[in-house]
Amino acid sequence: TVIPSAVLFQAETNTLSGSSNALVLGNDVHISGNSSINLTGSDMTQAQIGALSIDTAKTLTVSTDSVGNDAGFGKTLRVSGTTTLGTSAGTVNLVANANVAFDGPVTDNGNAVTVIKTGSGRMIFDQTTTANSLSSASFIETQGGDIVLVGSTADNASNPIGSATIKLNGGGLILDSKGANGTLGPVFGNSLYVMQNATLQSIVNAATTTFGGSSNQLSIASGRTLTLDAI
């Protein structure tokens, strides 16, 4: 197979630790009113901003001209800095047909916040180096698209969503890992509420992944089915 040079592009960033094709903008973004970020154009697949803060009762819409985001393909907005969800107790809305990846710490600033995700894109949490300050009183609710948690078995690794509770109300949950410690995969000590038929999928290879614990809850609404799918 010959790949034409016209469709090959140099990575936006190249370092000894790796490379990325994300268009690195680096700007901090504050959503103080209903706002949108549009990922369009054929010369990039990802865009990376700095910190992100979304005020309570506000909506961020992330749109794309790509397809396949419901399967993790298409365009992705990456947040490299701290994401602050809410300014007080209440709801924060994310409408995303693009994927949104939270690569930096995530916090609710001590408020009981419910993040409601709609749209076909995935919502990805993968920061495990420092603590993510989401309390068990905060909910991450998907009404469309999957939530993806990427854990770690490294010493002192943090849960990518802290202690937040997940609610599946039209989307699914995917568990992944940056690696395994022998046959032991990551542990996600979170509660789970299943409001609609949903799938909990683990794509951690050859390792045991743990979700929940003795202090967490698993609640499945009457008449609903949670399908467990381990690859």
Image (cartoon, grey):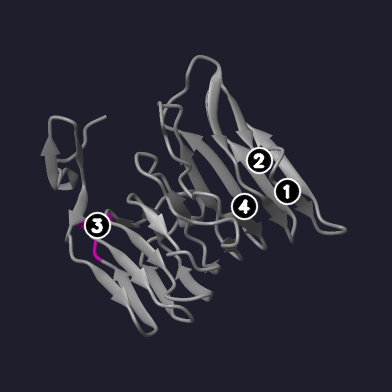
Residues at marks 1 and 2, CA–CA distance in whole angstroms:
7 Å
Is the residue 229 above or below the residue 6 in the image? above
User: Which of labels 3 and 2 is toward the front?
Assistant: 2
**What kind of element bears circle 3?**
strand
Amino acid type of the residue tagged 3 in the rendering: Gln
Amino acid type of the residue tagged 4 in the rendering: Gly
Q: Quadrant of the C terminus?
A: top right
Amino acid type of the residue tagged 1 in the rendering: Gln
- Where residue 172 is drawn, which disc sits there? 4
Answer with mark 4 or mark 2, whichever residue precedes in sequence: 4
Amino acid type of the residue tagged 2 in the rendering: Gly
> Which of these two is toward me, 116 or 37?
116
Q: Is residue 84 left or right of residue 94?
A: left
Is the residue 102 above or below the residue 202 in the image? below
Residues at marks 1 and 3, CA–CA distance in whole angstroms:
35 Å
Q: For mark 1, does the 10 Å Cα neighbourhood hold few (<14), some (14 to 19), or many (20 or more) residues?
A: some
Residue that numbered label 1 is attached to: 217
Residue at the (40%, 26%) spot, across then down: 155
User: Which of labels 1 and 3 is toward the front?
Assistant: 1
Q: Which corner quadrant of the image does residue 62 belong to?
A: bottom left
Task: Kindly check if marks 1 and 2 are in contact, taking CB atoms under 8 A apart as contact.
Answer: yes
Residues at marks 4 and 2, CA–CA distance in whole angstroms:
16 Å
Residue that numbered label 2 is attached to: 212
Residue at the (44%, 81%) spot, across then down: 58
Answer yes or no: is residue 5 visible: yes
Q: Position of residue 216 (x, y in %)?
A: 69, 45
Q: Quick one: which residue is furthest to the front in this view?
A: 110
